[in-house]
Image (spheres, grey):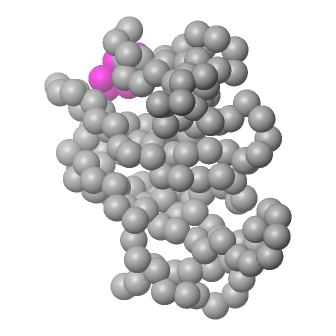
Amino acid sequence: MHTVAGEIRIVELERNCRYEVTINGKRLIATDCGDEQDPNAGAPRPEILVYSRLPAKPFSQVVIFQQQMAGNACDGGPLWLLGLRTDGPASRSTNIDFCGGAQPSITVEQDRIVISIPGGPRNRGEGVVPGEDWLYQNDELTRLKHKRGPGLPGTSPLQ
């Protein structure tokens, strides 16, 4: 993928286990399913979920990645954002823990990105997993506080 910072590549080093994400050949992140110290060991395969052509200041562009696992315990995996500048270093956010259910909805605005993870019933057992909203603005990723919303799937952001 061509971006304002150069070419992003996802390189598979070992099938379903070891990957790296590079910009112009420089490694940004490496994953290894066999490395217990790797926070992405359980979901080592990065995929581009969204590529924003709109700026989210201070970045010229933002790419949202989702880590995928080799098995099927989760429908999806952790999300992270990569802020790109035309004339400066890239910036990687922390991970948003995600293990499937309905896919997140992503809203890109001029100066921020909102990621909404819908809630719903648990895959196994009883109960409900609450929804989450995350705000990415000014190179900071923040979980928004919620109040209980009406209906099973939901929560709604506090105003």
56 or 23, nearer to the observer: 23
Does residue 107 sit above or below 125 in this rendering? above
Residue 117 image-quadrant placement: bottom right
Q: Find residue 84 and report its horizontal and vertical position in percent.
A: 30, 33
Residue at image location 58% in from the left, 37% down from the top: 67
Looking at the image, which residue is at 65% across and 52% down?
99
Q: Give the range drawn in magenta.
A: 3-7
Above-or-below relation of 135 to 81: below
Q: Is residue 42 above or below residue 112?
A: above
Task: Report the residue that reaches farthest toward the front.
Answer: 36
Count of numbered tags: 0
Q: Where does the image place residue 5, in percent across and percent down from the top left?
A: 30, 23
Residue farthest toward the left in the current orientation of the protein:
87
Secondary structure, magenta segment, majority class = strand
Q: Does the rendering let one see residue 60?
A: yes
Q: Does the magenta stretch include residue 40?
A: no
Q: Is residue 111 left or right of residue 97?
A: left
